[in-house]
Image (cartoon, rainbow, N blue to C red):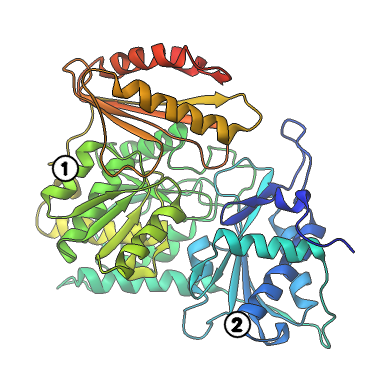
Amino acid sequence: MATGLTSEWQALQNGSDIRGVALEGVAGEPVNLTPAVAYRLGQGFVSWLADTLGETTSELVVSVGRDSRLSGPVLMSSLAAGMMDLGVKVFDFAIASTPAMFMSTVTEGYQCDGAIMLTASHLPFNRNGLKFFTAQGGLNKSDITAILTLASENNFPTATAKGEMIARDFISVYSNGLVQQIRQAVNHPEHYDQPLKGLHIVVDAGNGAGGFYAGKVLEPLGADTRGSQFLEPDGHFPNHIPNPENAAAMAAIRQAVLENEADFGIIFDTDVDRSAAVDPQGNELNRNRLIALISAVVLREHPGSTIVTDSITSDGLAQFIESLGGVHHRFKRGYKNVINESMRLNAAGQESWLAIETSGHGAMKENYFLDDGAYLISKLLVELARSKQSGKVLSDLIAALKEPVESEEYRLKILAEDFKTHGNRVIDQLQTFAKAQSGWQAAANNYEGIRIACSSPAEDGWFLLRLSLHDPVLPLNIESNVAGGVEAIKTRLTTFFETVSQLDVSSLSR
């Protein structure tokens, strides 16, 4: 019997969750997330959970759900079988959202000991993965390593009695919670039950798991959802990638808003832990704009709050947050990083009600610090309804946001085998180079890579070079407040990169 965590099992770890290839068909990638692997992962999770809670596996209740991926049904069946063979009672939620899975651990009448979502977010159709939850939230990296080690060792006891699997419609329970949240927050004096009456709102679910939002949340609230698109789950993702950061996806929801003359557009990623929006003029409300919108709401409700974001947010956003009396705390990329940092600040006595990445992962203290795209959008819909009552528009909230004239991201591929060591060496070398440059100054309180403010009139912006969380890549973000500024900054940086070995900088030439 093998012991410890083998390389095959270790390869499935993707930070604080599990990702793998579940289907053949893309660049000949070997399948490593098979039904047999899912079976053992289920057993690994419930064994870890039982040990953590001080219970036996036969005392546990675990919910399972999935997004629309083609590999979902068979993997979910095997996952559940592994848990039931250890005596666990399993709730089958069928197609669900990642936030809903967590909510099943804290919702009265369910209060599951654990929950698992089968999803690989926006990755290609042949991928899949697992996200794990307890009532304390999503698991951390060390927890995933422990679960994988148990699965790798495959030393599980035989249960005296097999568990059962029970189908439950939890997405309706979760949706009703959002409906009640919006009704209570708007508190419309004339039509309390339908506070979105008179608003035309279109939803683009990208054929992922988010189609429920139109029929189970918006329509009961009185919204007109005509023109909503790609609501039906389809694991081929035939229309566009379900990803608010994808240009084609954002173009699709912008077009839907304009063609239907809608008041608001909503787009979700595959498993609904991320979202973005579109205003009536077809303008995107994502990245810095989305952060600014929800920050304005949070700072009205909790004056002086610290807003934790990832490292690539703009200087204009920082100024906007500070102008509203908030504190902008720019931290590392990675949704778990920003969430954990916000929780750390609260524990240290620094009030922080929002942790949000530019990717659309947004988590609020009032909502268990759960990165929930549907909850975030619901908060904005409350503001949309209130704005309509007062004769204003939602975008009035961010009228003072200063946005960069130019913004670009370049991905520089690291060719060295030990890419992390080489990448960090490049960052160190760039710090030395930057110190010698006129008009360049290192940004204060930078927690990731190197961020430099470029103050010359021709540049008037900043750049950030950091090491990717998982890939052999150095992402380079450049923003400028003047036309031609990105090119000016890039030109100076190119003189540095020409001296660096084992780095593919061809993306800079575009």
Q: Identify the residue under disc 2.
A: 53
Residue sitting nearer the eye, 272 or 498: 498
Give residue 353's position: percent from left, percent from top. 28, 63
Give residue 179's position: percent from left, percent from top. 35, 70
Q: Is residue 286 left or right of residue 337?
A: left
Q: Which residue lies most toward the right here? A: 1
At 73% from the left and 48% from the top, the residue drawn is 22
Mark 1 Cα-neighbour bin, 10 Å: few <14, some 14–19, many ≥20 = some
In terms of sequence position, does the residue under pointer 2 or pointer 1 come before the other?
2
At 48% from the left and 73% from the top, the residue drawn is 136
Q: Identify the residue under disc 1.
A: 319
Residue 510 visible in the snapshot:
no
Q: Are the residues tagged 2 and 1 within 8 Å (C-beta)?
A: no
Element at label 1: helix
Residue 74 visible in the snapshot:
yes
Q: Quadrant of the C terminus?
A: top left
At 52% from the left and 77% from the top, the residue drawn is 105
Residue type at tag 1: Gln
Residue type at tag 2: Leu
Locate residue 487: give its quadrant.
top left
Residue sitting nearer the eye, 440 or 143: 440
Gap between marks 2 and 1 measured at Cα: 45 Å
Element at label 2: helix
